Amino acid sequence: MTSTLDAPSSNAGGLRDRGAASAPAHPQSHEVRLDAVGRSFPAAGARQVVLREVDLDLTAGEIVAVVGPSGCGKSTLLRLIAGLDRPSAGEIRIGDTPLRGTDPRTAVAFQEPRLLPWRTLEHNVALGLPRGTGRREGRERVRELLQLVGLEHAATQRPREVSGGMAQRASLARALARSPEVLLLDEPFGALDALTRLRMQDLLLEIHAAEPTTVLVVTHDVEEALYLADRVLLLRSLLEDSSSGSIARTVEVPGDRPRDRADRTLADLRVELLEGLGVHG
Ligand SMILES: Nc1ncnc2c1ncn2[C@@H]1O[C@H](COP(=O)(O)OP(=O)(O)OP(=O)(O)O)[C@@H](O)[C@H]1O
Ligand SMILES: [Mg+2]
C-alpha cells in the first residue's frame, strides 16, 4: 500500500494518444433519453416524491455530471438509468429501446469499489466481461484494461492488499470490461484522498478519450463536475419544493478537455452552481 501505487500509471496516456481528444464517439454509442421520469416511494402512509418530471437527453459520447443536495435523488436517478429500479412515471430509453431492467450496454460503478475480496484484481475485472467471452479474448481484454488503469503490476493481488485508489481503479476497469456504451458512475471517487481523486479524474478523461462512451457521473464535488463534464445538471430536493421538476438548472461547460482547473469561466460557473446548492460566497 504505497502512495506511489495510488497514482494511475502513464499507460493510459498511451491509449490517450491512440484515442486523441477529437476521438469519435463509441461507434455504436447510444443516446439515453428520459422522458418525464418520476420516482416516488411509500413513506408513512403517503408517498415521498423523490424525482419528478426529469427530461434528459444524453448524446452519444457526452459526459454529464449530476450534482445536488444530499437526498435529492441523484443515486435514485442513476439506479433508474441502470435498470436497477423502475420509474413510477415516464419512460427511459437506451438508443431506441425502452429500458426494461438492466441492459448489457450499460455499466455501473459505485462509490465503494464492491470487489470480491477473495478474488485477485484481474479476476474481479474479468467478472465485468460480457457473457460468452472466449478465454483468450477475455484474458487479453483484462490485460488491456489493467494496463489502461495502471494496475498491470497488481493483477494477482487481492483487494485487501491494495490501496483505496487501486481498488477504485480495478472497479472502473471492471465496469469498462464489457465496453459499455453508457457508463454510470455514482460518486466514483468520493472515498479517495484529494490528490488521488484529481488523478482519477484525469484517468477517467484519458479513458473516455480512448474509449468514448456516454458517461453520467454523480458527484458531490462541483469542481469535479465542471472539470469532467460537458454539462452539469443541478437537481433540487423535492422535500423543500415538491411542486417543481427535479432539474433545477443545466449548466453547459465551455471549452475542450482537458480543462485548466484554474480557468476563470469555470470559477464563475462554480459560484453559480454553489449558489444553486444554497452555498453563498
Ligand atoms: N428503495 C427506497 N425506498 C424508499 N425510499 C428510498 C429508496 N431509495 C431511495 N429512497 C429515498 O429517496 C431519497 C433520495 O435518495 P438518493 O439515495 O437518491 O439521494 P442522493 O441524492 O443520492 O443522496 P446522497 O447525496 O446523500 O447520496 C431519500 O430520501 C431516500 O430515503
Ligand atoms: Mg447518492
Image (cartoon, rainbow, N blue to C red):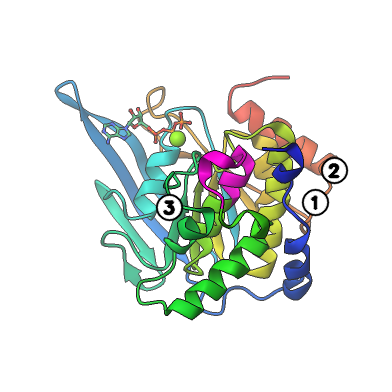
Name the front one of labels 3 and 2: 2
The one nearer the camera, 175 or 88, is 175
Residue holding disc 1: 259
Q: Position of residue 11 (x, y in %)?
A: 75, 63
Residue 167 highlighted magenta (yes or no): yes
Residue holding disc 3: 55
Q: Where 140 sits versus 66, above or below?
A: below
The one nearer the camera, 89 or 141, is 141
Residue range of the region highlighted in magenta in the rendering? 157-169
Q: CA distance from mark 2 to mark 1?
A: 8 Å
Identified by mark 1, the residue type is Arg
**Dot 1: few (<14), some (14–19), or many (≥20) neighbours within 10 Å?**
few
The one nearer the camera, 197 or 128, is 128
Q: Is residue 250 left or right of residue 93?
A: right
Q: CA distance from mark 3 to mark 2?
A: 30 Å
Q: Residue at x 59, y 22 (%)?
A: 278
Residues under numbered marks 2 and 1 in contact, where contact means CB atoms less than 8 Å apart: yes
Q: Which mark is residue 263?
A: 2
Magenta part, dominant SS: helix
- Whether disc 3's CB lies below 8 Å from ligand 1 is answered no
Identified by mark 2, the residue type is Asp
Q: Is residue 222 left or right of residue 157?
A: right
Name the front one of labels 1 and 3: 1
